[in-house]
Image (tube, rainbow, N blue to C red):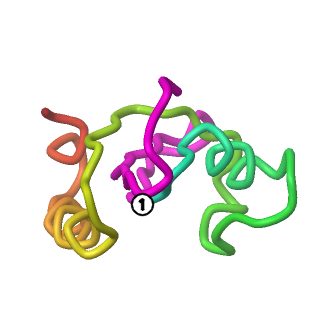
Amino acid sequence: MTEELASDWFVYVLQSEARSVTYVGIARDVDARLAQHNGEVRGGAKSTRAARPWKLARTEGPYPSRGEAQVREYALKQLRGPARLQP
């Protein structure tokens, strides 16, 4: 990722390379979070284990607060299928 402030939050969409599913989340360090989802380092959501490996399909931000990122995350989670991948 590019140089960012410690308070910046990003919304990301992952796409499974094994199955036809997506996952939406928020993080300060998207690359580190992707590594967690892929099982390369400890952590990651339990719901993403079955569809590994994941690739980063989309990133939005930075958002100045976690709350603002969560609002956008919620909006993206309401979308289904390819709509989550559209800018």
- 64 or 43: nearer the viewer: 64
Question: Which residue shows up at 42% across the image and 58% down it?
Answer: 7
Q: Residue at x 34, y 34 (%)?
A: 58
Q: Give the residue drawn at x 50%, y 52%.
A: 6
State the image quarter where residue 72 is shown.
bottom left
Residue 29 located within the stretch drawn in magenta: no
x then y, percent, for residue 62: 29, 44
Left or right relative to 46: residue 80: left
Relative image position of residue 52 (x, y in whole percent): 70, 47
Q: Position of residue 81 (x, y in %)?
A: 24, 49
> How many numbered marks have been drawn onto this rendered protein structure?
1
Q: Is residue 25 in the magenta section?
A: yes
Query: Can you say which quadrant of the picture contains the C terminus?
Result: top left
Q: Is residue 58 left or right of residue 15?
A: left
**SS for dot 1:** strand
| Residue 74 shown left or right of residue 51 in the figure | left
Query: Which is nearer the eye, 80 or 55?
Result: 55
- Is 64 situated above or below 60? below
Residue under pointer 1:
26
The quadrant where residue 66 appears: bottom left
- Measured from the top left, where is residue 76 in percent x and y? 20, 59
Q: What's the residue at 15%, 34% (across, down)?
A: 86
- Farthest residue in the top direction? 2
Reply above or below: 82 against 47: above
Q: Residue type at mark 1?
A: Ile
Q: Residues within 10 Å of mark 1 (few under 14, many from 20)?
A: many
Magenta residue span: 1-26
